[in-house]
Image: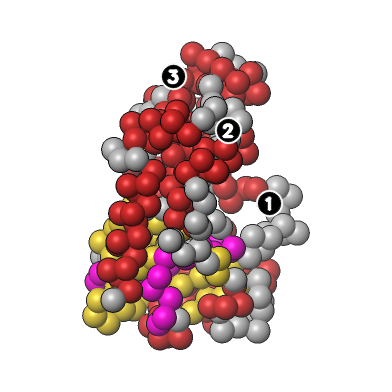
Amino acid sequence: MVSKIPVIDQCTVSNSLRSEIMVEDLATYLHRNKSLVFPHRHNFYHFLLFTQGGGTHSIDFETFEVAPWQIYFMSPGQIHTWTFDGEMTGFVVNFDKDFFKTFLLRPEHISYFSFFSGSVQDEVFTVKEEQRTAVLNIFARLQQNVQDLDFARVSMLYLFHVLEKQREPVRPKEVSLYNHTLLRNFLQLIELHYATLRLPKAYAELLYITPNHLNALCKEALGLSAGELIRNRVVLEAKRLLVIQNYSVSTIAYELNFSDNSYFTKFFKKSVGMTPDEFRKHMNINKSHHEK
């Protein structure tokens, strides 16, 4: 039996008078939440800067080695766990899903930053040396002025722009603003419809472009075909459902609109290299190991 992976509320982990945002030094946060080493999800946005320490952390089943000046971002719903070693220093920021809702004309604007795309590969990176002093100062000012919500919003947007700008040269290829917008819209449509729309043609129709254009755009910008991006999102949701709670494989297949359990199992094994039941057992063993 696999235990349900809990959803952590902002008020559970935050030591703040405000529920909208929390900014705290990492050592204090970890001491206060020292029992939070089991796999869990958040219902809020979360990002963390390491300035010292070691160990590992995982986001949606991908594990990363902790390194100084590494930063990671998480969106609501992603599965997360950590195992830290030594003295940990840095900063943690948690903010509500609606934190920018009344501040920005388009609150979805933050999803246009690469590290809030929902792709784990974009969510973990190292702050470049020339930006470290500026980034550290922004975190410090945020912590000192967290009760001023407008100041916090402006500071965070500035931080996001600083971090996004430093990442631009390492993107696979530059794409036009139009194609960049198309790609973001495609990824957002996948998030909305992955369980019911599986073919690139369906998404191309929603975007008013040809399937060939969509596929070429995905290949150029991300190195993956449109079909691979759709399948990867379906596989991720299958993994989440397998470990979140004790659903049967047939129930998961039904939830993801597969015609039958056998087809779902073949689809999952082709993508992951093991059957759904084998993946669940593997994750349960890893979880038991971390809890010891």
The amino acid sitting under disc 1 is: Pro
Q: Secondary structure at mark 3?
A: helix
x, y (%) of residue 250? Answer: 51, 40
Residue at image x 38%, y 73%?
Answer: 37
Disc 3 from disc 1: Cα separation: 29 Å
x, y (%) of residue 102? Answer: 75, 59
Disc 2 from disc 1: Cα separation: 31 Å
| Residue on which disc 3 sits | 216
Tell me which label, 3 or 2, sits earlier in the chain: 3
Q: Secondary structure at mark 1?
A: helix
| Residue on which disc 1 sits | 107
Mark 1 residue crowding within 10 angstroms, few (<14) / some (14–19) / many (20+): some
| Residue on which disc 2 sits | 257
Q: Nearer the viewer, residue 184 or 161?
A: 184
Location of the C terminus by quadrant is: bottom left
Magenta residues? 34-55
Above or below residue 76? Residue 179 is above
x, y (%) of residue 111? Answer: 57, 47
Residue at image x 51%, y 58%?
Answer: 245
In the drawing, does residue 116 fall left or right of residue 70?
right
Q: Nearer the viewer, residue 71 or 118?
A: 118
